[in-house]
Image (cartoon, helix red, strand yellow):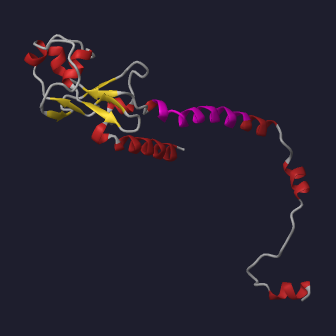
């Protein structure tokens, strides 16, 4: 088949094959000039805050240590982080992965102000007999040594609500997608 046959077999609606001389096009348009340099600099400067913005969620949604808040400790005149009172108020659970015991993050014992007022310390953990275990009904206490406030703390994305933390991260990225 010759090139003439190629031309006659083609549909009349398709353009003819042509080649572009890029050197001639660049000569007509011009090379990298002042406008392109300014545009490159502005785009580069805008890229820095966007990069920082993409790294914000690990800090905004940082997960910190938490446990059930026990308001009866304060009512009994004890500090909220008093070890004796916490041993009495919070059950200890075994962490299978580390083979250690740690205070429960999502449960507490049903205690009264009078019980805590008459508590003799030191009180050994899990030595209280059969006490009623409650889910955290008075909120949570968060360790604020590193982060004073995060999305995790603000919306109590702990225990039963912990899967919502992943949803918060996904919604953050949807907001970035919509905003860009």
In the rendered structure, the answer to whether residue 97 lies left or right of residue 43 reads: left
- The residue range painted magenta reads 41-59
**Where in the figure is residue 104, as x and y percent of width and height?**
28, 31
Residue appearing at x 18%, y 17% in the figure = 73
Residue 56 in view: yes
Quarter holding residue 54 = top right
**Where in the figure is residue 145, as x and y percent of width and height?**
40, 18
**Where in the figure is residue 91, as x and y percent of width and height?**
23, 29
Up/down of 20 relative to 46, above or below: below
Q: In which quarter of the image is the N terminus?
A: bottom right
150 within the magenta span: no
Up/down of 15 relative to 62, above or below: below
In the rendered structure, the answer to whether residue 117 lies left or right of residue 151 reads: left
Specify the farthest residue to the top. Answer: 77
Q: Quadrant of the C terminus?
A: top right
Query: Camera-side residue: 175 or 115?
Result: 115
In the rendered structure, the answer to whether residue 166 lies left or right of residue 51 reads: left
Residue appearing at x 78%, y 75% in the figure = 15
Residue appearing at x 66%, y 32% in the figure = 45
Prevalent SS, magenta region: helix
**Where in the figure is residue 21, as x and y percent of width and height?**
89, 60
Quarter holding residue 105 = top left
């Amino acid at each position: 088949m010759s090139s003439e046959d190629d031309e006659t077999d083609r549909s009349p609606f398709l353009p003819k094959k042509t080649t572009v001389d890029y050197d001639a096009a660049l000569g007509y348009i011009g090379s990298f000039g002042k406008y392109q340099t300014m545009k490159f600099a502005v785009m580069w400067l805008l890229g820095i805050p966007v990069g920082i913005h993409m790294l914000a969620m690990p800090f905004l949604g940082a997960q910190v240590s938490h446990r059930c808040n026990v308001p009866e400790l304060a009512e009994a005149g004890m500090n909220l982080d008093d070890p004796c009172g916490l041993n009495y108020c919070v059950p200890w659970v075994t962490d299978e992965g580390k083979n250690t015991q740690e205070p429960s993050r999502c449960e507490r014992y049903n205690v009264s102000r009078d019980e805590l007022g008459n508590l003799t310390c030191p009180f050994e953990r899990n030595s209280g007999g059969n006490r009623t275990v409650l889910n955290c009904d008075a909120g949570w206490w968060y360790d604020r040594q590193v982060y004073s406030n995060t999305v995790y703390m603000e919306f109590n994305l702990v225990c039963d609500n912990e899967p919502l933390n992943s949803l918060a991260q996904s919604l953050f990225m949807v907001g970035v997608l919509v905003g860009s």
